[in-house]
Image: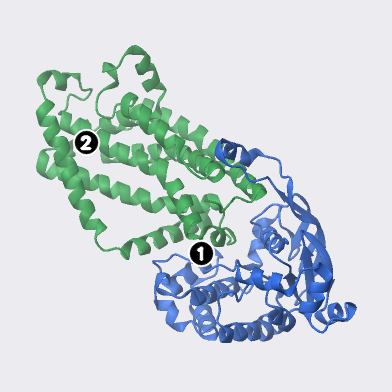
Chain colours: A blue, B green
Amino acid sequence: MSDSAITIDSLEKSFPPARSGWRAFLQPFAAPTSPALRGISLQVKPGEAVALLGTNGAGKTTLLRILATLLLPTRGTAVVAGFDSVRESAAVRRHLGYHAGSDLGFFSRLTGGENLRFFGRLNHLSASFLRSRIPALAERFELAGALDRQVRTLSSGTIQRLSLVRALLHQPKVLLLDEPTRSLDALAAADFRRFLKSEVLTRQGTSLLFASHTLTEIEFLADRVAILKEGNLIALDTPYALKSKFGAASLEEAFSRLTGHSAHSLEESSSS
Amino acid sequence: MIRVLRDCLLFFQRDLRIASTYRSPLVLELIEALFGAALFYYVARFVDSPQLRQALPQGNSYFAYSLVGFVFFDYLLAALESFDHTLTEARDTGTLEPLLVTQVSLPVMLVGSAFYPFVVTTLRIAVYLGWGGALFGFPLRSANWLTVLVVLVATLLAFSGLGIFSSAYLLLFKRGNPAKWFFLGVSSVAGGMLFPVSILPAWLQVVAHLNPVTYALDAMRAALLDGASLSAIAYPLLILLLFAAILLPTSMLAFAWALRRTKVTGTLSHR
């Protein structure tokens, strides 16, 4: 068993080229020739928070989805909480909390509470545990009112908070978050970051790998930043070391110098 | 095994809860079943004749014969459609990926989500037959309900394999349910839904005898209309179980392969 919470070794992922018309029928059998990840290696230590930073198409979401067992790598390995993401995917999922950054993913006719109970039970949490866990997390995320309302009546920010609660329900050892505060207002986002830092990372010792375009969020949460460009890992260091290395006053400037992309690229990624 | 059953029950409870948030469909379905039963009754009255009765295997009224064929097709439809429907709905509502990162595997999710439609279809069939018995003289008293139940389960097992094959197709190609169109299309002619296969030309009779629907309908009519015992329907029942024994494991393998393939191509949640 590895000492790391996540160990990624020479990970490559390619997709078959998109096809249209009658050729779309051949796509499921086509060879994967469009690379999305090109030999990524990195480790996340227990209790550590690592941010994935890069423009759209850099490979952040692909990497998170491989770790979440939703994609198979083309080559290389990914080990989460000591389990191989391909051969031991069920064990990986037992120790994993995943938030896809979307405000979809709930049964709209069920209430927030019913949804959380359903997903909690699918993670084999007992009904009595959920009876105390859900209200506690809901209170922390100011979701108490949402528990009794059908999801279709909730705002996208509220649904996103509900999704974050779902990812935390089973107290996972490893948390994967894809743009966790994308739909949250500034206050809710700041509150969530504080909660992640104080409760999830510091108190529970959960490891966090997250993708974000919000540099203040990365500076606040991340112990290290992994910068991806066109599927390659081009830098992995602490925010301070990255700034020092490139003589930059801010992480934004360091990113800009390293990738050749302006800060606008990230803002555009964030808004897209 | 107990855990799998418990997981399946969770999906059933979820679907029941979602259905309870809609108020009117139950009443509408009761009315629809009444009109459906009435339709078959009056068509049967129109075409019924001593010659027709003689041509029917159980010698029953054409109304009873056609109503059984019709409600049985409802069941066949549920077996062929419910897996696809589950997958499509999960994909379209964005719940597929959150479900897939839980401890429950996709096959369990599909089977669990099929429980509710099967129960609802069974109830709908009961309502159809109930209206038929109460208002139009359907011979409910002659049924052997134990045999009916066994035939229903065997039918579900046999045709669920086709439904799972269809889901594998849907995973890969995103649209279409070839099993449904092929089986319903072929079976509506060469399956004995509304007329006995004995009136078909010889080559279509061969097709009918290769079709599991024919055996399922024969067994169902014998159980419902003649009160046949299990031993009396042993032959069609064995054929159905043979279909199930072949189709269920092969369809699960096909589904597992398709799921793996979508994780390679990255098209798992694509529409």
Q: Is residue B36 above or below residue A52?
A: above
Quadrant that contains the N terminus of chain A: bottom right
Q: Given the image, what chain letter belongs to the residue carrying mark 1? A: A
Residue A159 in the image: x percent, y percent? 50, 73
- For label 1, count other residues whose C-alpha is less than 10 Å away and answer few (under 14), some (14-19) or many (20+): many
Q: Given the image, what chain letter belongs to the residue carrying mark 2? A: B
> Does residue A223 appear in the picture of this structure?
no
Element type where label 2 sits in the image: helix
Q: Is residue B18 left or right of residue A43?
A: left
> Does residue B201 appear in the picture of this structure?
yes
- Residue closer to the observer: B108 or A202: A202
Three-letter code for the amino acid on which mark 2 is drawn: Leu
Nearer to us: label 2 or label 1: 1
Give residue B163's quadrant in the image.
top left
Three-letter code for the amino acid on which mark 1 is drawn: Gly
Identified at 40% across, 62% down, the residue is B13
Q: Provide the residue designation for mark 2.
A: B67
Residue B264 in the image: x percent, y percent? 67, 48
Identified at 32% across, 66% down, the residue is B21
Identified at 68% across, 63% down, the residue is A56
- The answer to whether marks 2 and 1 mark residues whose Cβ atoms lie closer than 8 Å is no
Q: Is residue A189 left or right of residue B121?
A: right
Q: Is residue B150 above or below residue A245?
A: above
Identified at 45% across, 54% down, the residue is B89
Residue A52 in the image: x percent, y percent? 73, 69
Q: Is residue A43 left or right of residue A144?
A: right
Numbered mark located on residue A105 in the image: 1
Q: Is residue A80 left or right of residue B268?
A: right
For the residues labelled 2 and 1, the Cα–Cα distance comes to 41 Å
